[in-house]
Image (spheres, rainbow, N blue to C red):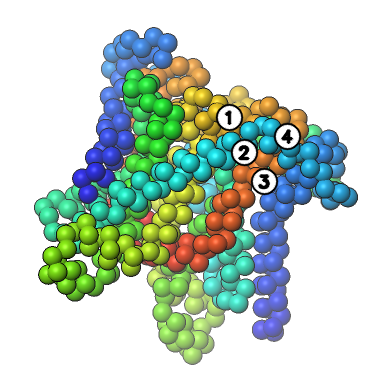
């Protein structure tokens, strides 16, 4: 057990604390001498319009991912749970986008969304929906929404799987009793399935929320946070600050903000489930 | 009425399934078409297979990236299991003070964003001049531990205590018990967790992007990105590269699908 704890502490806990400490300095890879800034980096963050955009976008990621993925995943889980025969194939289908590397997913969808030659616009033209043809990833108003849609495509199957697991843990005789009482499908879902699934739904919601705070890969591949920071999130901005702008201390401050948001989200969900932290983390 | 309902529902699911699969089907078909054609008519089906894209992918070192990813993934997963199994055993079976606190400590890792440790590890790697592979395998192992310890512990707790007591009476030490009794019984859990970690490591981007210096050491995600940069206009080649990158995991997934689902079930409920 000791080696595991040691590796964990060396690669995660120690750097984590170090990040927070480093956020009080400013330095660059070219000029590694550190200058003490105190809370200077944070003061600058407060005035940084890009950080505001990033926070807003992370907010959209959280809200849209929850609102789209949870109900859709629930619908799929309940539907697949009741269509047992075709179960396996459908499960494979909905889960398969998760197997594709995020970079590959990003590349595929970038071509899909291409404003000039993309498959999406050509499909819309063919369907006669000329008004919907758009610039997609190149359009600052749509870039974030377009990438969130891809993320929903990729992860809904995963959340379906988690909910399906919760669904299968509900004993059949409860449903049997409901059927004998003549309860409708909706009432059965509303008054039996949903309450019994409360905990797993909350755990899943935590996964979605934390995932939305950390989101990086798809955005980096598809827009690198552009056009002109329109799709920037904390993780892309942190990466840009550290490794293209070479402002390490500032990037460490952004990373600390991410960490704090993750902690807040976790505490909220732990409160909501009313169970110990260990269990919420156990998702 | 009931039949109609069922048909409607099945139709709906079939439609959804098609929408889900469409981008992947499009990718595979597109990888066999000349890049220029793709841009003229994205939805056409090729009359004959056009293989030049795969030649371009091969020349673009996709094969090398595959090999690098395979190496990094296998080494990381083996080390993850080797470190997690004794820890999971200790948490499940040995009573020691601070065990709950230590477990909680490791489990915090499930929520920590990679970006929160990126800068210090970057400094550490350049200060110690750690090689590219070691630089990424270290954090992969560390981030792989929490889920692995959690799942294996959950499985180990269920193994009847008599088995262990009998072995102790026979004079077996804890490592021996772990290796010859617990691990064989827990094989499904080990398989599940190994596949999960493999999928994660195979796809990982931020660490690989920052820590790998030499192009020849790129793993698939970084490699694909640089390949795309070189073939920005050749869509066919990009799609061929993507298809090649997807195939190994697809095979692994289809082969172990049942395990994965069972493991996920166990993990999600614990």
Q: Would you identify the image quadrant in which residue A38 lies? A: top left
Q: Position of residue B167 (x, y in %)?
A: 18, 68
Q: Are marks 2 and 1 on the same chain?
A: no
- The secondary element bearing badge 4 is classed as helix
Mark 2 packing: few (<14 Cα in 10 Å), some, or many (20+)? some
Task: Find disc 4 in the rendering and name its residue.
Answer: B56
Residue holding disc 3:
B243
The spot of residue B45 in percent (x, y) is 84, 50
Pointer 2 with pointer 4, Cβ within 8 A: no
Q: Can residue A60 be seen in this view?
A: no
| Residue B148 visible here | yes
Please rate how many residues cluster around mark 4, counting C-alpha atoms within 10 Å: few if below 14, some from 14 to 19, many from 20.
some
Image disc number at residue A273: none
Judged from this view, the residue extending furthest toward the bottom is A180
Specify the label residue A224 is tagged with.
1
Q: Which residue is drawn at 60% across and 60% down?
A: A94
Cα distance between the residues tagged 2 and 4: 11 Å
Q: Where is residue B202 in the image (x, y as percent from the top left)?
A: 51, 44
Q: Which of A199 and A278 is in front in this view?
A: A278
Residues at discs 3 and 2 both on one chain: yes
In terms of image quadrants, where is residue A40? top left
Query: Mark 3 or mark 2: which comes first in sequence?
Result: 2
Question: Are dots 3 and 4 in contact, CB under 8 Å?
Answer: no
Of tags 2 and 1, the one toward the viewer is 2
Quarter of the picture containing the N terminus of chain B is bottom right
Q: SS of the residue at dot 2? A: helix
Query: Mark 4 to mark 1: distance in Å?
Result: 25 Å
């Amino acid at each position: 057990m000791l080696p595991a704890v040691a590796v964990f502490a060396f690669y995660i806990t120690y750097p984590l604390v170090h990040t927070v400490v480093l956020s009080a300095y400013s330095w660059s890879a070219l000029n590694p001498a550190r200058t003490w800034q105190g809370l200077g980096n944070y003061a600058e963050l407060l005035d940084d319009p890009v950080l505001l955009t990033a926070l807003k976008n992370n907010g959209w990621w959280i809200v849209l991912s929850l609102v789209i993925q949870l109900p859709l995943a629930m619908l799929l889980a309940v539907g697949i749970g009741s269509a047992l025969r075709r179960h396996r194939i459908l499960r494979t289908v909905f889960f398969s986008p998760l197997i594709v590397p995020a970079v590959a997913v990003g590349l595929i969808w970038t071509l899909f969304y291409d404003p000039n030659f993309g498959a999406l616009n050509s499909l819309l033209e063919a369907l006669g929906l000329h008004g919907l043809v758009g610039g997609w990833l190149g359009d600052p108003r749509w870039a974030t929404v377009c990438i969130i849609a891809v993320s929903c495509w990729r992860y809904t199957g995963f959340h379906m799987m988690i909910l399906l697991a919760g669904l299968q843990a509900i004993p059949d005789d409860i449903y049997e009793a409901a059927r004998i009482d003549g309860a409708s499908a909706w009432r059965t879902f509303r008054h039996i399935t949903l309450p019994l699934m409360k905990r797993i739904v909350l755990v899943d919601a935590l996964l979605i929320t934390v995932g939305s705070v950390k989101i990086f890969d798809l955005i980096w591949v598809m827009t690198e946070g552009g056009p002109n920071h329109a799709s920037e999130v904390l993780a892309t901005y942190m990466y840009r600050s550290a490794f293209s702008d070479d402002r390490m201390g500032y990037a460490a401050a952004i990373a600390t903000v991410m960490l704090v948001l993750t902690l807040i989200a976790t505490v909220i969900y732990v409160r909501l489930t009313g169970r110990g932290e260990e269990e919420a983390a156990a998702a | 009425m009931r039949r109609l309902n069922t048909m409607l529902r099945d139709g709906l699911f079939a439609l959804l399934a098609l929408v889900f699969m469409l981008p992947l089907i499009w990718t595979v078909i597109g990888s066999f078409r000349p890049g220029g054609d793709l841009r003229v008519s994205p939805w056409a089906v090729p009359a004959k297979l056009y293989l030049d894209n795969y030649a371009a992918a091969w020349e673009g070192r996709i094969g090398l990236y595959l090999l690098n990813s395979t190496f990094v993934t296998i080494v990381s997963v083996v080390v993850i299991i080797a470190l997690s199994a004794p820890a999971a055993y200790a948490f499940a079976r040995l009573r020691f003070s601070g065990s709950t606190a230590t477990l909680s400590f490791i489990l915090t890792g499930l929520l920590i964003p990679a970006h929160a440790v990126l800068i210090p590890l970057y400094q550490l790697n350049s200060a110690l001049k750690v090689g590219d592979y070691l630089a990424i395998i270290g954090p992969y192992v560390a981030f792989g531990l929490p889920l692995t310890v959690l799942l294996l512990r959950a499985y180990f707790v269920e193994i009847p205590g008599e088995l262990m007591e009998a072995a102790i009476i026979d004079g077996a030490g804890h490592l021996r018990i772990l290796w010859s009794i617990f691990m064989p019984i827990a094989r499904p859990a080990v398989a599940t967790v190994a596949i999960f970690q493999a999928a994660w490591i195979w796809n990982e981007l931020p660490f690989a992007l920052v820590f790998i210096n030499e192009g020849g050491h790129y793993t698939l995600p970084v490699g694909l990105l640089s390949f795309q940069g070189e073939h920005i206009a050749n869509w066919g080649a990009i799609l061929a590269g993507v298809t090649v990158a997807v195939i190994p995991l697809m095979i692994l997934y289809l082969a172990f699908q049942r395990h994965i689902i069972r493991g996920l079930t166990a993990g999600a409920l614990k």
